[in-house]
Amino acid sequence: MDSGVKKPGVTSSQVARRAGVSQSAVSRTFTPGASISPKTRAKVMAAAKELGYRPNAIARSLITNRSRIIAVVMAYLENLFYPDVLEELGRLLVKENYRLLLFTGFMDRDSDPVFDQLMQYRVDGIVLASTSLSSELSEECAAAGIPVVLFNRTTERDAVSSVTTRNREGGRRVAEFLVAGGHKRFGYISGLESSSTNRDRFAGYKEGLAEAGHTEIIYEVGNYDRAEAEAAARKMLSKPDRPDALFVANDHMAVAVMDVARHELGLSIPEDLSIVGYDDVGPARWTSYGITSMSQPLKRMVEATVNILMDQISSGEIEAEHRILNGELVVRTSARLPKSGVVEVDGRRIFKPAKG
Amino acid sequence: MDSGVKKPGVTSSQVARRAGVSQSAVSRTFTPGASISPKTRAKVMAAAKELGYRPNAIARSLITNRSRIIAVVMAYLENLFYPDVLEELGRLLVKENYRLLLFTGFMDRDSDPVFDQLMQYRVDGIVLASTSLSSELSEECAAAGIPVVLFNRTTERDAVSSVTTRNREGGRRVAEFLVAGGHKRFGYISGLESSSTNRDRFAGYKEGLAEAGHTEIIYEVGNYDRAEAEAAARKMLSKPDRPDALFVANDHMAVAVMDVARHELGLSIPEDLSIVGYDDVGPARWTSYGITSMSQPLKRMVEATVNILMDQISSGEIEAEHRILNGELVVRTSARLPKSGVVEVDGRRIFKPAKG
DNA sequence: AGCAGTTTTGCATTCGTATGCAATATGGGT
DNA sequence: ACCCATATTGCATACGAATGCAAAACTGCT
């Protein structure tokens, strides 16, 4: 039964023969900017359509040494922030005529196989949005001369490009907001302690609180994981000396924390407890949660990411570039309102403390 | 500054020279099952490691006529069900030594560019999980001799493989459940009316209700879209003759509907209104929602998808195969409990009506 | 028509790997 | 030591498209 047979695949030579021209002519027809007369081009196009020809991207890649593929490494997609990023990346990359090779669903630890595959496919660029394996992997890739952008994280040595928001300032703003709300006891539920975003958010929060004279922070670790965040919330909020203001390192965890606080512990939000999250992700906007949250400008972040990649690919220069964007503290119902500082901008409520 | 230069890239010939063997030997070393002596293999491996050689997957694809790439077409990822699918697909495909090329973030209408790219990259298989462009695209791909699996949808003519759950039976079970709960007025919020899943779910629901003597169904369209579902809910639930039992075509919309019902219209769930969803997706399990929902066995669905693809790829036979799996009605708190039929299985509550 | 200048075309080669085939090396048995 | 069977190796070619170069075909001008 002719088993194991693949699709035949129309080649440029077949089209050439059909059109009565050389293979080069076919190639030039499909190469923008190549020298080809309108007449032959038309002949080729006709023949191509008849035969259903499409240039073989694999063969093209081999000779041009460009795969037009960008690898995106995202260990897990549970946090809706990342699917959103993925979607936007897909949109922009396709505009630039690039494809998106996705690496996901693997446990964070084993970076080596991932790296191997990246190398084997000769991807033109890499977006690293995976929490933990960033440092090792990014250095390897950069060393191999492939443009890399760390998305929403950085490494100590800033040898590799990154796109982030001002996490430290964000943490600080959260602190200012909660202080302005008149809170007294402050808590923090941490993300992955090793991640740069978490460190920066916490550092800013701590600074902001310290400036207002609050040095004690009730602390638990949630590791950006829903179940762990629930456990952390249970532990922190069931004690009598629980905080009345809680900053959760991202919305993905904040949602879990709110569920525990309300439905397991019977707390009212924001009466008994104010909660502020980070990312301003989908569920934060759902009325059941209404999470007051530091937003990350997702579209602009993705745009910056793609820009950096395109620059580096076309220039061949792999000079690290760091794009740091601003977020806003979007005010909703999960935290008590301060007496002042909340302003309305295009229908959204933002916390903008009067400066100085 | 040498601009435009790419990574050099170590070739098998370089490794061969270094190891003092032929290029063929290098190739065979990296081809499982090829004839090569342990001794030369070791020499090659050593040289390869020294030079940092990795086989060029592009060149390999060209000659083997296998890209080891599976294309996944998913128009939008807003519904968490799909990111979950993606993650699981990534996991299984990598195990089979395949890569995942993702097409997302485009508007559903323009299928042609997508198809073009699929063809250009000579993908070995395609998973179509996009709601609307399925029929056109799938036929084209199938015609091109590429294995295609429709994920969670079908087309009329079943010329192309698919993996689904028993949506009709699911709809029927929902009806039985709501009838058993003693409800009197039944509503339905529809997904995309043109989608097979929606049609089947609704058909089953209707049948089930009809059997219990209920022929009137209050109907609105949500198009699987959050905002539209909200609008539909407002319209349907603000009228005095609103339903007391509502089947929403998927959980993604059900969440929106619950928010509107509770917070905009002040309805109590399930006292004033029972809601049942479909998919049993993440947020359905969150205590704020606790949606009673028909589950889709995601892991088994993805497994079936990958199996079909692998079979067809290795056999070269592209015979349509339809895998239809069973779901369960997971009982939570969004709908009134019937007096009987709810059983507990591994800690989850399932509705299993005593059979006739 | 004839010529210089410009486009357009085809030839031949290249990218990096896999593989059929023939040549060579290895091993075992006597 | 010799022969045959088997395992390993290298040679040469193929995959499909892009591209430098030289030949060929136009163009406009006198």
Image (tube, coloured by chain):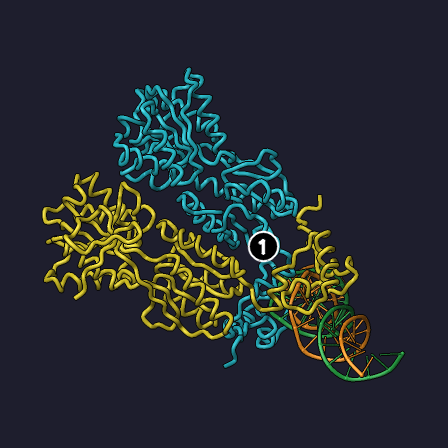
Chain colours: A yellow, B cyan, C green, D orange
The chain to which mark 1 is attached is B
Left or right for A132, reference A268: right
Please determine whether, in this image, residue B17 is positioned above or below residue B132: below
Please state which of residues B130 and A95 is positioned toward the viewer in this rendering: A95
What residue appears at the point 25 percent right and 55 percent down from the top-left corner? A329
The residue to which callout 1 is attached is: B117
Q: Residues within 10 Å of mark 1 (few under 14, many from 20)?
A: many
Q: Residue at x 22, y 42 (%)?
A: A260
Q: Can the viewer see residue B254 in this picture?
A: yes
Does residue B347 appear in this view?
Answer: no
Look at 24% across and 48% down and name the residue there.
A332
Image quadrant assignment for residue B349? top left
Q: In the depicted view, which residue is nearer to us: B6 or A39?
A: A39
- Residue A19 percent coordinates (x, y): 77, 59
Q: Amino acid at mark 1?
A: Gln
Indicate the quadrant containing the C terminus of chain B: top left, top right, bottom left or bottom right. top left
